[in-house]
Image (spheres, grey):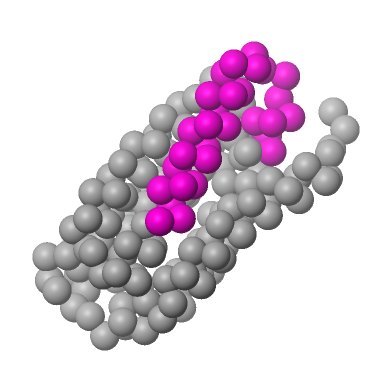
Amino acid sequence: MKKNYKLLLICLAIPLAVGGISALISGGGMKAFETMSKPPLSPPGWLFPVVWTILYLLMGYSLYLILTSRADEKLVGRGVYLFFMQLFFNFFWSIFFFKFELYFFSFGWLVVMWALIIFMMITFYKISKKACFVNIPYILWVTFAGYLNLGIALMN
């Protein structure tokens, strides 16, 4: 199958842009993160943008795999819908957490996001196993983020 590089770049750019805009709106939230009480195993602040950049690229690649699959249009549509729903929740999570410091609300929001990612991955699996599997680091990181979020909510 011939690669559609224009579509691939668009698919990679979408989550990167969403994450970048969310980070800009969140402002100096990482500065506050460095000073708050955190649970054990909390990584240093510099690691977050590195990890999120990689995860956004993997997300974008999975979207590309879904859009270029030859799967049933209805199933692809459901996968794309779930992709953008979880990305919507992803966008607002850091704003709620870092900008507004709504730690318990952010945790609940993250739980919904986690469920949307799982539903997205299940749908992606039916279309392209590879599209599902490249999101494993994402769901693992969001699970870890849930642990950190709840720990911070309880400690601050």
* Residue 7 picture location, percent across and down: 78, 42
| Residue 146 appears left or right of 30 | left
* Residue 95 picture location, percent across and down: 38, 64
Viewer-side residue, 57 vs 84? 84
| Residue 128 appears left or right of 119 | right
Where is residue 34, by image quadrant? bottom left
Asked whether residue 115 is in view, the answer is yes
Instruction: Say which residue appears at 26% left-offset and 85% top-offset.
Output: 35
Instruction: Say which residue appears at 31% left-offset and 50% top-offset.
Output: 110
Specify the farthest residue to the right.
2
Viewer-side residue, 37 vs 99? 99
Viewer-side residue, 146 vs 110? 110
* Residue 67 picture location, percent across and down: 69, 31
Secondary structure mostly taken by the magenta-highlighted segment of the chain:
helix
The reply to whether the magenta stretch includes residue 86 is yes
Q: Look at the image and give the residue range highlighted in magenta.
A: 64-92
* Residue 103 picture location, percent across and down: 22, 63
Where is residue 16, by image quadrant? bottom right
The reply to whether the magenta stretch includes residue 156 is no
Q: Is residue 128 above or below residue 10?
A: above
Instruction: Say which residue appears at 41% left-offset and 30% top-offset.
Output: 119
Q: Is residue 31 above or below residue 54?
A: below
Asked whether residue 54 is in view, the answer is no
Quadrant location, the N terminus: top right
Q: Is residue 17 above or below residue 117?
A: below
